[in-house]
Image: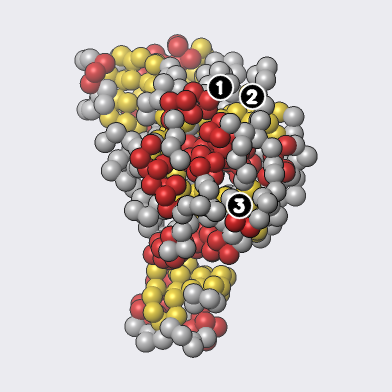
Amino acid sequence: MGCDWNKTRAGYRRGLYLLLGMMLSWAVGCPAAQSLVWKKDTDKVSANIQSAPLEEVLNLMSVATEWEIYVQPESDQVVNVKFQDRPASEALKLLLGGLSYAVLPQAEGPSRLLVFRTNISQATELISPKRDPKDDTSKPIPNELVVTLKPGVNIDDIAKKVDGKVVGRNEELRVYRLQFETAEAAERARKLLSEDPEVAKVEGNYNVERPPDIKPVDLSSVPELSLKAESPANDCEKVIVGLIDTSVPKTGGSLDAFLLPQIDVAGPGPTSYTSPPHGESMASTIVRGADFSSGGKAKISILPVNVYGQNVQANTYDVANGILQAIKAGAKIINLSLGSEGPSPYLAEVIRLGQAQDVIFIAAAGNRPTTTPTYPAADPKVVAVTASDRTGNLASYANRGDFVDVIAPGSTIFQFNGQRYLSSGTSVATAYVSGLAASMADPCNKAYSAVEAQIRKDLSVRK
């Protein structure tokens, strides 16, 4: 089955991007000596910055405004300012001193601030906000190990030898998650386990990125779905998308009919929500993607697999186990709108096992934007998805690079408890592609691998 991407993309864009420039209230506090508060709702700024280098000030601005900031290299200066509730245009002049600047609104994604001494074209160095160490997904979780045992070995005996606590078990593959009191204890255990003849493999466990905040918007309407949930006539017709994400609560809306009973890998999710969880927006986007690309004729179900529990972060061990449970429950399309900068051998092995069972894996490339590989998207067995803006070009926030395979729209608007919300990013693009894959699937007559091949061809990124 072919895909008329131009027609599909036009459908995706209906009703999207209308209020991406909407200003939302946001304030970021810093230590008393260096503080910057940027109120988006009133466009007023307050600052108390003493003897700070320009890079530190631009870092504060990047976090407070969510702008992409580019600076001309070697534009060094020390900033000393103190003011209260100044208009943003005036505040920029005070913060940047004698440097020139330009704020460029983007059709899709955050605005760009260009800071320069000589010429605007020289503002080429991207300021990357410093991340909380807990959000660094490039390094293993310091006090954890993932251990694969040889047949017949008892994990509890192994854990006792190295003073570890077993917090995750996969008896079928003999892969276990061990937790230690300190990073030093974990490192000592790694050395001992690496030399233990009963141990097949020792590796790290990586945090998975936190789901981004989802912003409420005010629109007159959201396009109605023509797709209706239908039960397949037989098992052959089942098309199940495994959504490896946060919880997807049932709200009484039309989305509920597409949801299978949720699998909780890391414990149950919250019992109530004041705003939609990430998985809710992904499930809605999957259905909308199938609706737009099939003309309302796709027969799909979504299997929510909650790998976050009630935590702000997931980890690659739980993601791998979530995939295994989704496959056992019949999912043939696995949506991974999440990622880590750390490659997990266990996760890679699970993907390999799934592909051998004709399972498609579709994953987000990331929203830095850099060319740094994001996993599992960078796994060659996975369809790595980046995001386009409303014109079909690469979105300013989206990762790019040789590991990226396909591109799809990066924004969606959906309803949750009567309120409309905007979700943007390569996560959204991934969910659209999963919806498209579900609409193309014809499991009675062709392999899912053929669907993957068609998607890689039709949505390919120009490299």
Q: What residue is pinned by disc 1?
A: 14
State the residue at coordinates (56%, 19%): 19
Quarter of the figure with the N terminus: top left
Q: What is the count of numbered marks?
A: 3
Q: What residue is pinned by disc 3?
A: 237
Q: Which mark is residue 223?
A: 2
Front-most of 463 and 234? 234
Marks 3 and 2, the one that precedes in the sequence: 2
Whether residue 32 is visible to the viewer of this picture, yes or no, is: no
Q: Could you tell me the amino acid type at mark 2?
A: Pro
- Vertical comparison of 462 with 230: above or below: above
Marks 1 and 2, the one that precedes in the sequence: 1
Q: Could you tell me the amino acid type at mark 1?
A: Arg
Percent x, y for residue 430?
48, 41
Q: Could you tell me the amino acid type at mark 3?
A: Glu
Is residue 283 rendered to the left or right of residue 203? Answer: right
Q: CA distance from mark 1 to mark 2?
A: 7 Å
Secondary structure, mark 2, is loop
Is residue 114 rendered to the left or right of residue 90? Answer: left
- Vertical comparison of 56 with 104: above or below: below
Which image quarter: residue 255? top right
